[in-house]
Image (cartoon, grey):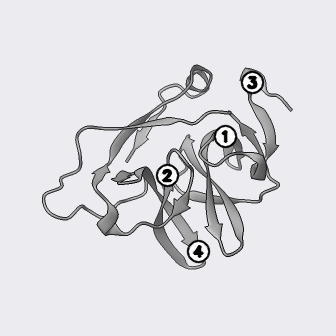
Amino acid sequence: MAEPGGFVERPALEVLAGHSVLRPMVDGPQALCLKGQRRAKGHLQDYTVALSPVAGGGHRLDFIDPEDRLTDCGARLVFIADANLAEQSGALPHPQPGDLVRTAEGLWLAVSETSGLYRFVSFIHVETGEVRRLREAALLALHPHWRIAAPPALAALFPGLASGR
């Protein structure tokens, strides 16, 4: 079903990882999210990360059922890292949810993930939507401040779209 602005509602499994999506939130209006996917043993797991508004507790990875309906915005967002890097003399600080990190593979958004009683930091590649953990040795730079350049239709729905910690 087509939404205003040419967006299309479809099951999560049909939305490409890395696309921007609109997802209804339990505690408020729709949120602009990044769609992610993780390869698990023999199957794929679908996730979203709310970018605007960001829920209390910061950027977190939310598991979604593959049949859940998402509004596919049909576009990838462009994440722009601030040139002012975190203090990086010696080893990089441990990434916190909301940090953008650079590896040889590109930019990743650090997100909070909960599994049972454990809470840890995972990463979502901002272009491909791949979700995984990263070794700290693979991190080349850490950007606590960044912004998003969104297509005009999304920028109108979410003015001031910028984030970071």
- Under mark 2, the amino acid is His
- Give the Cα distance between marks 3 and 1: 12 Å
Q: Which is more N-terminal, label 4 or label 3?
A: 3
- Under mark 4, the amino acid is Ser
- Res. 8 image quadrant: top right
What numbered label is drawn on residue 21?
Answer: 1
- Give the Cα distance between marks 1 and 2: 15 Å
Q: Could you tell whether 59 is left or right of 164 in the image? A: right
Placement of 60 over or under 42, stated as above or below: above
Placement of 140 over or under 22, stated as above or below: below
Q: Pointer 1 and pointer 4: residues touching (CB < 8 Å)? A: no
Query: How many numbered markers are drawn?
Result: 4
Q: Is mark 1 on a helix, strand or loop?
A: strand
- Under mark 1, the amino acid is Val
What numbered label is drawn on residue 115?
Answer: 4
Residue at 50% x, 72% y: name it. Answer: 119
Nearer to us of marks 3 and 4 is 3
Q: Is mark 4 on a helix, strand or loop?
A: strand
Q: Could you tell whether 42 is left or right of 79 in the image? A: right
> How many other residues sit within 10 Å of disc 2, few (<14), some (14-19) or many (≥20)?
many
- Give the Cα distance between marks 3 and 4: 36 Å
Q: Which is more N-terminal, label 1 or label 3?
A: 3
Q: Mark 3 points at which residue?
A: 6
